[in-house]
Image (cartoon, rainbow, N blue to C red):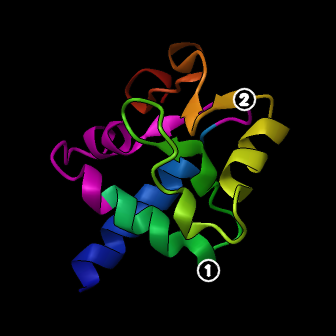
Amino acid sequence: MAKNDNFFERVYEVARLIPIGRVTSYGAIAKYLGAARSARMVGWAMNGSGVKEDVPAHRVVNRKGILTGKHHFKGTNLMQQLLESEGIVVEDNQIVDFEKVFWDPMKEL
């Protein structure tokens, strides 16, 4: 299990770098970490990030900009509310202008 814990910590390190008002995808983080086929594992890391207050898990969505992790947040629309408080527009659980707010760690870091 230690290997997963290490991977999760690396995921959290990348997630902490996502700027306010930007989002990335599970797959983009996985690819950046050299584990391109591990998008689901990044999702598990985000799911487990609730105990880490400093991990902005709300800024990580699926590759189409859909808030697939929203049911892991307390409250009905907390993930959407957090994104909207940062200026991101969400309609029908999907980020509007996803390409404009997408943050790619491969290019940005």
Q: Nearer the viewer, mark 2 or mark 1?
A: 2
- Magenta stretch holds residue 85: no
Identify the residue at horizontal 59%, vertical 35% (top origin).
92
In this image, 61 relative to 81: left or right? left
- Looking at the rendering, the stretch of residues picked out in magenta corresponds to 19-41
For residue 96, above or below residue 86? above
Q: Can you tell which mark lies on residue 88?
A: 2
Q: How far from the left and from the top, in percent, is residue 98?
A: 53, 21
Q: Quadrant of residue 50?
A: bottom right
Residue 26 located within the stretch drawn in magenta: yes
In this rendering, the answer to whether 93 lies above or below 3 is above
Mark 2 lies on a secondary structure that is loop
Label count reads 2
Q: Alpha-carbon distance for marks 2 and 1?
A: 24 Å
**Which residue is rendered at x = 47% and y = 38% of the image?**
66
The crowd level at tag 1 (other Cα within 10 Å; few <14, some 14-19, many 20+) is: few
Name which residue lies at 54% across and 33% down: 94
Read off the residue under disc 1.
Answer: 51
Mark 2 is surrounded, within 10 Å at the Cα level, by few (under 14), some (14 to 19) or many (20 or more) other residues, namely many
**Residue lying furthest right in this view?**
85
Viewer-closest of 51 and 96: 96
Horizontal relation, residue 89 to residue 36: left or right: right
Q: Residue 74, percent across and down?
A: 69, 72
Kind of residue at badge 2: Ile
Which residue is depicted at the point 47% across and 63% down? 46
Vertical comparison of 106 with 46: above or below: above
Q: What x and y, as percent, mark residue 57?
A: 58, 56
